[in-house]
Amino acid sequence: MNSIHPDERGYYGEFGGAFVPEMLYPNLTELRKHYLPVIESNDFKKEFRLLLRDYVGRPTPLYYSPKLSGEHGASVYLKREDLTHTGAHKINNTIGQILLAKRLNKKRIIAETGAGQHGVAVATACALAGIGCTVFMGKVDMHRQKPNVERMKLLGAEVVPAVSGSQTLKDATNEAIREWISHPADTHYIIGSVVGPHPYPDMVARFQSVIGLEISDQLKEKTGKKTPDYVLACLGGGSNAIGAFYPFIDNRVTQLIAVEAGGKGIHSGKTAASIALGRKGIIHGSRTYLIQTDDGQIIEPYSVSAGLDYPGIGPVHAYLHDTGKAKVVNVTDDEAMEAALWLSRREGIIPALEPAHALAYLRKMKFRPGDTVVVNLSGRGDKDMSIYRQYLHR
Ligand SMILES: *Cc1c(COP(=O)(O)O)cnc(C)c1O
């Protein structure tokens, strides 16, 4: 392995791997065998690159923010993933996986979704590719996130309520896995972050690496230097963060900072700060840090931001944290909310609540004049309007 890619068995140091029931071995073996040859083929690269350009709208701009720069005494740039088709970085991965599924002759896609953002990105890619799509979603989440359920349906996806357990993300995940086990030959399962069993974390990281590669080129063009002093990104499962960090992981200049959701405070019992509180364990097929009780029960995570509300962390981030290659910090709901409001009023950009966590952490940093700082603005805030509205009127 190097710092970015796992070894053959999917390990980043002691993290990662593929801990799945035996019945899933055939599905994962097929993926493991084919994913690298397919995504490194010229024909795949060409099709992926064209779709990223003409369908997703890449490269996304790297915007120099005069207001953030003035506020923090450094040159602050925003990587505008909020301007992609469907409004967040998730589309980079779903387009990559749909092209892979086509080359593996899959006739149908399944996925799980919590808040519905990944579900919408999957439904979009499936409509584009003309492949049928079933999205599993907790029944409780379907009520909470109705507009996204309607979007998925409009895009032609079938949305299946998961009615077991707490009727949320983990139950939807169980349903999706059950479905995959019973249809190994013709179905591909699209996971939405750098989580899950090998090869998903590596595959998703490769599809998201376009973010960091663009940052590097765009900085070079704007400043003459390819490497920033800092890159900040929010950390849910970790796909936008690893995408933004990708080309900078092994250079000693760039400090990589991943910002977790502290929720109401990391000692409040209502948090999603997996690294701050987490202990090593296995979740969704890989070994990583997760929030669990003394006897190994997963603790229900909490964050005001649905995309960060996940009890674990991609194994690559557990590894980057333990080796000191990235720094993992956290901010609270209120700090993120303040930062979102500030950016909206001062720059005219309404960010999603997830990247507002990364923005909020800028206030806790000290910069030297001349520092170059990039914040990955992973998505736009339209989906969070009802939460912003409540905050303004409280
Ligand atoms: C889903 C989501 C995230 C969190 O997922 P990662 O895999 O950690 O990137 C962050 N930002 C936005 C806008 C999202 O929709």
Image (spheres, rainbow, N blue to C red):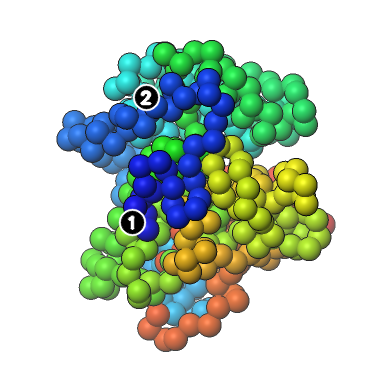
Q: Residue 21: horizontal and vertical position, in percent? A: 56, 26
Disc sitting over residue 2 in the figure: 1
Which residue is drawn at the image coordinates 61% and 43% (left, top)? 282
- Give the amino acid type for the residue marked by disc 2 in the picture: Glu
In the orientation shown, which residue stands out farthest toward the bottom?
A: 369
In the image shown, does 66 or 177 lie closer to the viewer?
177
CA–CA distance in space, label 1 to label 2: 24 Å
Q: Is mark 2 within 8 Å of ligand 1?
A: no
Q: Taking the image as drawn, is residue 153 in sight?
A: no
**Label 1 SS:** loop
Q: Is 243 in front, or is 287?
A: 287
- Of the residues under marks 1 and 2, which one precedes in the sequence? 1
| Left or right of residue 334: residue 362 | left
Q: Residue 132 carries which label?
A: none
Residue 241's place in the image compared with 55, above or below, is: below
- Asked whether the residues under the numbered discs 1 and 2 touch, taking CB atoms below 8 Å apart as contact, a structural biologist would say no
Percent position of residue 347, x then y: 51, 64
| Circle 2: element type | helix
Asked whether mark 1 lies closer than 8 Å to ligand 1, one says no
Q: Can residue 185 be seen in this view?
A: yes
Q: Where is residue 125 in the image (x, y as percent from the top left)?
A: 42, 28
In this rendering, position of residue 83 left or right of residue 310: left
- Which residue is at 34% across, 52% downward? 1
Residue ID for mark 2: 30
Q: Would you say 389 lies left or right of 68 here?
A: right
Q: What residue type is labelled 1?
A: Asn
What x and y, as percent, mark residue 259? Answer: 57, 62
Give the residue at x 69% y 60%. 277
